[in-house]
Amino acid sequence: MALQCGIVGLPNVGKSTLFNCLSNAKAQAANFPFCTIEPNVGVITVPDERLNKLSELVHHQRIVPTTVEIVDIAGLVKGASKGEGLGNKFLANIRETDAILHVIRCFDNENVVHVDGSVNPVRDKEIIDTELQLKDLETIESRISKVQKQAQTGGDKQAKAVYDIYLQYKEALLQGKSARTVKLDPLDRKLVKDLYLLTDKPVMYVCNVDEASAVAGNAYVEALRESVKEENAEILIVAAATEADIAELETYEERQMFLEEVGLKESGVSRLIRAAYHLLDLQTYFTAGVQEVRAWTFERGWKAPQCAGVIHTDFEKGFIRAEVIKYNDFTTLGSEAACKESGKMNVEGKEYVVQDGDIMHFRFNV
């Protein structure tokens, strides 16, 4: 599943530095605006200790982790919704992503120029929010004009329902609120799934701090936290410059020693990757055999045939059943054979909702 998170933010907040830490694809990191002209795409592996544990129990030939795509998108400025800077291109690139990682500068450094002359994370967040909301308002008003006549004649119930939803979005956007604050039931959401509103995407605020603030944050982080408390959004603290230093170290032992020295148990990059994975509402199931131990990505709530289709469309088309072992049972008993003998392998049909951590074997016929 090629799902993408887009890294966005004002120029010079640390987006490209963070992207370089996340991916082997090296974006140019420089002290000037718009150093990333084309969006850079990196495919990153999702850290999962369960995969390492399974690999210890199964005599395999290789390990294949699951992945998420991260897109580094050019910095945005005031007026982007009207085409200022790289505005239209920026907005087109972010529209193609599934979730947003909004990087916000929360550190002082006179050697790194801020595009607006001072550090103010709440203002910076609101600049981008406003530009995205204005673009969404433009989209909604265009849609309203197309469906309004059809909806108001009263003959088309679906058109009326869609029109009412559009009006809800318009009202929220006019109040300076993001589209994600409009609460819709699943059926209504399906009616307008083709909108692709920018401010309806899941968002996580990534506070880029200095090394001294990497553990507990700072006043800038707290100000931002207070400003987004009504959004039910996640905030992650990362020291991008420190993460860049960690990424330069060659061995796992060296990296762990560095983390301990700065008071961290785990790198911010690892936390960010996992958080991005969950932001997309993704989960993982495993296949474990002699050839490989592999993690597969699926969306929360998917049933067995859909998950089988992640491996190959033929698996979904010809799905017969799934043999399922729970991760804890597998690691406790030590093997598939032991799980079978203990009655810990369940045979599930088409209605089985796959759970995070399930170890699966699909039976199919095409």
Image (cartoon, rainbow, N blue to C red):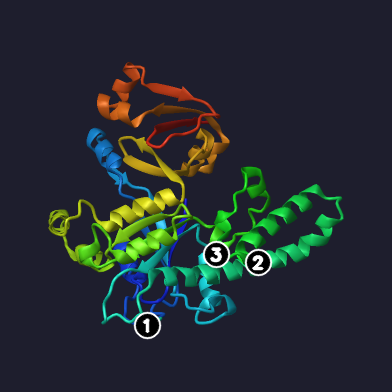
Crowding near the residue tagged with mark 2, few <14, some 14–19, many ≥20 C-alpha atoms within 10 Å: some
Q: Residues within 10 Å of mark 1 (few under 14, many from 20)?
A: few
Which of disc 3 and disc 2 is earlier in sequence?
3
The count of marks equals: 3
Task: State the residue at coordinates (44%, 54%).
Answer: 233
- Write down the quadrant of residue 125 in the picture: bottom left
Q: Disc 2 marks which amino acid?
A: Thr
Can you identify the residue that label 3 sits on?
Answer: 95
Q: Which mark is residue 359?
A: none
Residue hosting label 2 = 139
Res. 366 image quadrant = top right
22 or 112: which is nearer to us?
Answer: 112
Q: Closer to the observer: label 1 or label 3?
A: 1
Q: Are marks 2 and 3 in contact (CB under 8 Å)?
A: no
Where residue 117 is drawn, which disc sits there? 1
Q: Quadrant of residue 332?
A: top left
Q: Position of residue 179 (x, y in %)?
A: 58, 58
Q: Let me know if residue 74 appears in the view.
A: yes
CA–CA distance in space, label 1 to label 3: 29 Å
Residue beneath the point at 55% across and 29% down: 351
